[in-house]
Amino acid sequence: MDRKSFLQNSSILAGASILPATSVFAQNLESNGIDKLTDANGQFILQPLPYSNNYLEPYMDEETTHLHYTFHHGGAVKAANTDMEMIRKAMDSKNYESVDYWTKKLSFHFSSHVLHSIFWTNLNNKKTNPTGQLLKDIEKDFGSYERLKTFISHTAKNVDGAGWGILGYQPYSRKLTILQCENHEKLTQWGVVPLLVIDVWEHAYYLKYKNKRADFVDALFNIINWDNVAERLETAKKLS
Ligand code: MN3
C-alpha cells in the first residue's frame, strides 16, 4: 500500500475530517491532519495569513503582524529552502564539513516555520476560554485553567533570550505538557505535538510593548483561539 492510500484508509484521515471545513486550521491541514508546510514538490511554502494585518488589534498591532509574518516567518521559509538546497549540494560535492552547518540551520529555520504556522492559527480577535475535552485535560494535567495560565505565562515570560512558551501534547505519556523553547528548536521533549505556541522573540512585541515582554504575554490571553487549541489536541490524539 502506498503512502497516499494508507492515509486514506487510516483513522488519521477521519481525525482531520471531523474538523469544521471552514476553520482556519482545517484549511491549512494536509490529509494526514498536520499543518501544510510544503508544496507537492516538498518545497517549504508560506501559507496566506488567515486574517488581515489589523485583525489582532489592539493587542497585536498591525505593523508588528505585517513585519512578523512577512519577514520573520516568510524569511524562515525562504531560508529553510536554501538550507535544504545547500545540504544537497554539499553532499553531492562531498563537502561534508558544511553539511553539519546547514543541518543546524535547517533545524532552526524549519522549526521557526512550524511554530509560526501554528502561532497564526492560535490567535483570534476575541477572547475565548478552554472548554470541553480540552478543559477536562487541562484540569487533569495541571489542576485548573488558572494554574495552566500561570505555568505557561511564567515559562514564556522567562525564556532566556529569544524563544517560545509552548503547550503541547506528549503522546508517550498521553498528557499535556509545557515546554520552554529557546530560539525555535531547543529544549523540546521528543514527540511532543505543539498545540499553543507563544512567541516571545522581541520581533513579536517590541514595537508596541517595548521591553515589557510580560505585558505582551498577559495581553495575548485576550486573543488566544482556544477552539483552535482544542482542534489541535483532538488531532494530536488521533495521530498518536
Ligand atoms: Mn516570531
Image: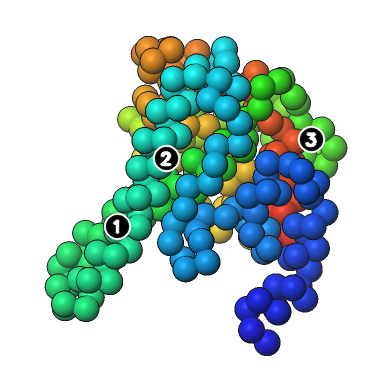
Which of the two residues, 1 or 132, is positioned nearer the viewer here?
1
How many labels sit on residues?
Answer: 3
Q: Is the CB of mark 2 within 8 Å of ligand 1?
A: yes
Residue at numbered disc 3 = 135
Q: Mark 3 or 1, which is nearer the eye?
A: 1
Q: Which callout, 2 or 1, points at the residue further toward the start of the chain?
A: 2
Q: What residue type is labelled 1?
A: Thr
Find residue 32 and report its horizontal and vertical position in percent.
67, 64
Q: Report the disc number at residue 82.
A: 1
Instruction: Indicate the quadrant containing the N terminus: top left, top right, bottom left or bottom right.
Output: bottom right
Looking at the rendered structure, the kind of residue marked 2 is: His
Residue 49 image offset from top left, x and y in percent = 55, 37
Q: What residue is rendered at 78% in x and 48% in y?
A: 21
**Label 2: how many Cα within 10 Å (few below 14, some 14–19, many 20+):** many
Tell me, yes or no, whether the two marked residues, 3 and 2, touch with CB atoms within 8 Å.
no
The numbered mark, 3 or 2, whose residue comes first in the sequence reads: 2
- The amino acid type of the residue labelled 3 equals Leu
88 vs 183: above or below: below
Q: Can residue 159 be seen in this view?
A: no
Classify 43 as above or below 63: below
Query: Where is residue 48 drawn, in percent x and y?
Result: 54, 42
Q: Is residue 77 left or right of residue 147?
A: left
Of pointers 3 and 1, the one earlier in the residue sequence: 1
| 141 or 149: nearer the viewer | 149
The residue at which mark 2 appears reads as 73
Which secondary structure, mark 3? helix
Q: Is mark 2 on a helix, strand or loop?
A: helix
Identify the residue at horizontal 29%, vertical 59% (top origin): 83
In this rendering, the label closer to the viewer, 3 or 2: 2
Q: Kindly state the secondary structure of the residue where label 1 is placed.
A: helix
